[in-house]
Every structure is written in C-alpha cells, then in structure tokens.
Image (cartoon, grey):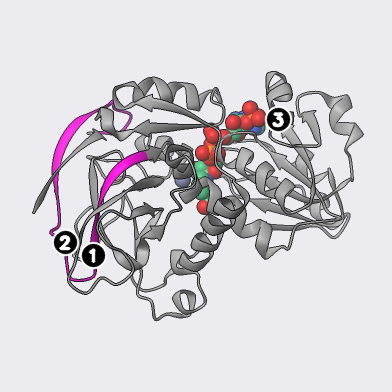
C-alpha cells in the first residue's frame, strides 16, 4: 500500500484536519499522480455537511485534481512518468453499459465510482484530491497541456466540464441569449464558455459587488436578481438559463426570464426540492432539464478546447492549512471565483 497524507473531515460538520491513510498499490492499468493542485468545489462543502445524506466519514474531499504522473502500471499506454495529468469526479465505471458506451460514464448503471465519498469496486471508501497523491486507472485520467497555468486548470476537471457539457449538448452559441444564474466556480466557467462559443451572456447574480469584475470575464450584461426592476427588464428574453446556485432558492423568477420554448438547465444541487408553479412552464412551452458533470471523452475535448483557446479558471490559490477559512468564504459566495489548494503546502 502507498502511504498518503490528506486533510479530512473526520465527522459531519467537522473542521478539516490533517489525516493519514493508505492508497492501493499501482495496478497494471493504474497511474499514480503526485497531486500539485486541487480545486475547492461547493460539492465539497455539501458533502462535509452531509447535505444529501450520503456522506462517508472520514471524508477527504476534492475532485478537481492536477498533478504529475510519478508511477505507471505495466500495461499503461496513455501516460509516462513525468506527464501532467488531471483527475475529475469519476475514477471507475463498467465501460460496457449503455451509458458507458455512449460516453456518459458518470452515469454508469453497473459500477460507477466517484473520486471521493463513494465506495470502490472492493467496497472501500474513496478519498479525494485534498491529499498528496492518488492512484487511478489510466482511462479515468486526463492529459493536461503544460501551456496553461496548472493551478488554474484544476477547476476545469469539475466546474469546467459541468458547464461545458450542457452548453455543447444544447448547442449554445451564436444567436443565443444565455443567462447564467450564480457567479461562482461553475457560473464563471459557464460565462467563459458561453462567450467563447459566441452566445450573448448575461449574469444573474445576488451580489451587486460582482458587477465590475464580471465584465472582465467577458459577460455582456449583469443583472442583480434581488432588484425587481432589473429582473423585469430581462423578463421573457433568454433562450437558455443555466442555474449554478448552490443554496435553496425559488426558481420561478428565473423561469420567467426564459423566452417561449426556452430551456432551463439546472446544475446546482441545493438540498431542498424545488416548488414550481405549473404555470411557470406551461406558459411559454418551457423545458427544465439538468446536467451532471460529463463523460471521459467530452472532458478531454473540453481540456483540449481550453488549451487551444487559452481558457482557465480565475482562482485564489490557498495553502492547505487555510481550507476551513476558504470553506467559510465559499459558503458566503465570497471567492473570485474558485479556491485552489497548492498541495505543496500539505
Ligand atoms: P459556488 O462557487 O459557491 O457558486 C454558487 C453561487 O450561487 C454563488 O457564488 C452565488 O452567486 C450563488 N448563490 C448562492 N446562494 C444563493 C441564493 N440563495 N440564491 C441565489 N444565488 C445564490 O458553487 P459551485 O462550486 O459553483 O457549485 C454550485 C452548485 O453546483 C453546488 O450545489 C454544487 O454542488 C453543484 N455542482 C453540480 C455539479 C453537476 O454535475 N451538476 C457539478 C459540480 C457542482 P452570486 O453571488 O452571483 O449570486
Ligand atoms: Zn465539483
């Protein structure tokens, strides 16, 4: 076994603290990654608080992982020692079911394994990227271009693919008006991709103080959702609304800003179910859909697109010891726009 160091929540709602554990040995199809950077996703907070009732403690969060390959199994063909690599939210699937075969490995119906807070195929808990190293099957490891700032690439492995996937699926681009609700880790990547794909992008935010910085992301318009007049001014105007809100919220006002035949794409995972007026969707033939991260091939496509178009996240790099302060700030929406942990400080 490989000795690993991490920061873990030892119980629900606990502060994260140093914790040691073991990773499996490098198997014939595995690579071992020395983790350089790991992004801090709001999902990490949901899991530590056990918001969805599925948390396994001790819990080592982190599924936005970038690092260097330091060992490869004897049958590995995709990577060699020294390569830069990324690991996202999934580390195993059956590769044979309909979902796996159609590039939706994240929804594998047989043996999906998430990077952390899940059980692996042997029934052992998985531990994420707030650690110094991880062992992963090469197929679930992605090539990362060295051209980009690696710390700022880390969030692409979750925030990036989660926003890229629905924008591509719905062919959002030139001629479309896209509203992005919530300007956090996911939201700011949705803005960058929406603009890069040619859409007219409006940010709908609860935080007026994000207006100036938001324009630097390339957004065309900024609307404060708490201001009724501003919300009225965008009534019935968007082809797509992409909701990246982490907290419980009323989605009816956001359905009202869709045009006829518009599509509401939900990405956020707040704990409570929505209450939706039937009129919110019947009037205007509106569709509500969701999207969960992305498959292996589309993740690599997104990473390649980012390398070609010089797209990375806007980040605040933090030391490992400052993770609890970062969680507190992220819970308040106070980050521009993703915390990334410098794992050399672990
Ligand atoms: P984040 O960085 O904290 O961003 C969430 C944003 O939501 C905040 O910055 C804030 O933006 C807005 N917000 C917060 N409370 C709000 C409220 N009460 N009403 C309206 N807006 C509010 O979080 P994230 O990492 O982007 O993740 C967002 C959500 O997506 C989380 O629930 C996470 O678990 C989920 N997620 C889903 C997937 C998936 O596969 N679908 C993948 C990753 C994460 P403003 O200040 O601009 O209002
Ligand atoms: Zn995530």
Q: Secondary structure at mark 2?
A: loop
| Residue at (74, 30) in percent of width and height | 215
Alpha-carbon span between mark 3 and mark 2: 43 Å
List x then y, in percent, for residue 47: 38, 40
> What are the residue bounds of the magenta stretch?
11-37
Look at mark 2 in the image and give the residue it sits on: 26
Camera-side residue: 122 or 343? 343
- Direction from residue 12 to residue 170 in the image, left or right: right
Q: Nearer the viewer, residue 298 or 182?
A: 298
Residue that appears at 16% across and 61% down: 26
Where does the image place residue 56, in percent across and percent down from the top left?
A: 27, 45
Side (left or right) of 185 relative to 127: right
Q: Within the displayed image, which quadrant is ligand 1 positioned in?
A: top right
Asked whether the residues under the numbered discs 2 and 1 touch, taking CB atoms below 8 Å apart as contact, a structural biologist would say: yes
Q: Which class describes the residues within 10 Å of circle 2: few (<14), some (14-19), or many (20+)?
A: some
Residue 260 appears in the figure: yes
- Which residue was labeled with disc 1? 30
């Amino acid at each position: 076994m490989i000795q690993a160091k991490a920061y873990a929540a030892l119980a629900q709602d606990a502060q994260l603290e140093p914790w040691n554990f073991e990773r499996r040995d490098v198997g014939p199809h595995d690579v071992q990654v020395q983790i350089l950077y790991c992004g801090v996703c709001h999902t990490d907070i949901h899991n530590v608080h056990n918001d969805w009732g599925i948390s396994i403690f001790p819990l080592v969060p982190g599924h936005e992982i970038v690092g260097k390959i330091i060992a490869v199994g004897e049958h590995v063909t995709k990577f060699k020692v020294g390569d830069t690599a990324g690991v996202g939210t999934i580390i195993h699937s059956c590769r044979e079911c309909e979902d796996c075969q159609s590039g939706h490995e994240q929804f594998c119906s047989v043996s999906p394994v998430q990077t952390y807070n899940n059980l692996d195929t042997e029934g052992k808990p998985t531990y994420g990227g707030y650690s110094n190293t991880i062992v992963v099957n090469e197929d679930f490891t992605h090539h990362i271009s060295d051209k980009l700032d690696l710390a700022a690439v880390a969030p692409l492995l979750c925030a990036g693919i989660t926003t890229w996937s629905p924008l591509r699926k719905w062919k959002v681009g030139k001629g479309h008006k896209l509203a992005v609700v919530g300007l956090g880790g996911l939201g700011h990547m949705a803005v960058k991709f929406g603009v890069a794909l040619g859409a007219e992008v409006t940010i709908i935010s609860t935080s007026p103080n994000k207006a100036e910085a938001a324009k630097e992301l390339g957004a065309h318009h900024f609307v404060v959702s708490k201001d009724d007049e501003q919300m009225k001014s965008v009534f019935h105007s968007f082809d797509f609304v992409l909701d990246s809100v982490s907290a419980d919220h009323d989605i009816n006002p956001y359905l009202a800003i869709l045009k006829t035949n518009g599509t509401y794409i939900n990405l956020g995972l707040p704990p409570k179910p929505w209450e939706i007026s039937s009129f919110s969707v019947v009037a205007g033939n509106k569709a509500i859909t969701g999207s969960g991260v992305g498959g292996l091939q589309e993740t690599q496509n997104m990473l390649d697109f980012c390398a070609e178009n010089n797209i990375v996240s806007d980040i605040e790099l933090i030391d490992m010891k400052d993770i609890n302060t970062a969680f507190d700030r992220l819970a308040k929406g106070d980050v521009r726009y993703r915390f990334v942990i410098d794992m050399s400080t672990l």
